[in-house]
Image (cartoon, helix red, strand yellow):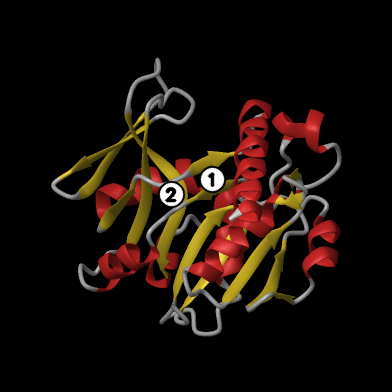
Amino acid sequence: MDSITAIILCGGLGTRLRSISGQLPKPMVSVAERPFLEYILDYLIEQGVTKVILAVSYQKEVIIEHFGCKYKSLDITYSVESTPLGTGGAIKQAMGHLSQPTEQLALIINGDTLVEYDLTDMYAKSTVKNADLVMSLISIEDTSRYGRVKVCDEKISDFEEKKSGHFGLINAGVYLFHSRLCNELPPQSSFSFERDFLDNVIHTHNVLPSISEGYFIDIGVPEDYRKAQLDFTKFNENVGNA
């Protein structure tokens, strides 16, 4: 997957996790004695990605000083926001760091979420089925925190607002984004990728789902952060005893 550059959104303030993270940027909170962002980067390496752009803003120095320009086999560059740009603005600015913006695919990932997405499937849908955007979806028992994603005729057709909990597909926060969509991004510098872009583009472009049954955790709230601690501590113990 050398042709794919990953963009990880690391600039959020993380106010809901502040009681745990203190002044740390959310992707750098410790999970099983490692910064959470390291787990995301490790999974990128497993998927064969070699280049990553970290979109940073709040407490950016903590991230830059920890990782520098290299993490294991990953080459790292930084897209630095002088002021917070929202998820959409951060992606728009980071896309400008691609070496050949008209030809490349970008794998966009939320910096507070770890999900076992299938990059091979996402890449196939982008190339074989000519998708403008491929969105990783996860099926979970209770969608009340996230809202549901509707799929019709193998395309993403709509987003359903957060309601009382029930089983369904949710947006896992991982996208394979073709750079030709940059022309469709809103003109303003700061905007929400989800509200100001996705809500519209699913009706005008070829936006396809990649559905996974794998692991998913979003550490954005204390309850799920504590779950991640238990999950990864147990995983590390099992690896150590193998």
Please report the residue visible at 60 percent of the width from the left and 67 percent of the height from the top: 94
Q: Position of residue 17 (x, y in %)?
A: 73, 32
SS under mark 1: loop
The disc placed on residue 197 is 2
Q: Amino acid at mark 2?
A: Phe
In this rendering, does residue 209 appear at all?
yes
Q: Are marks 1 and 2 in contact (CB under 8 Å)?
A: yes
Q: Which residue is mark 1?
A: 192
- Rendered position, 161 above or below 210: above
Q: Position of residue 41 (x, y in %)?
A: 61, 63
- For this view, does 187 lie left or right of residue 229? left
Given residues 102 and 39, the one toward you in this image is: 39
Quadrant where the C terminus lies? Answer: bottom right
**Mark 2 Cα shell of 10 Å, populated few (<14), some (14-19), many (≥20):** some
Q: Position of residue 199 (x, y in %)?
A: 37, 42
Given residues 233 and 83, the one toward you in this image is: 233
In this rendering, does residue 92 appear at all?
no
Please report the residue visible at 41 percent of the width from the left and 82 percent of the height from the top: 103
- For this view, does 59 lie left or right of residue 96? right
Please report the residue visible at 84 percent of the width from the left and 57 percent of the height from the top: 62
Q: Amino acid at mark 1?
A: Ser
Q: CA distance from mark 1 to mark 2?
A: 7 Å
- For this view, does 217 lie left or right of residue 138? right
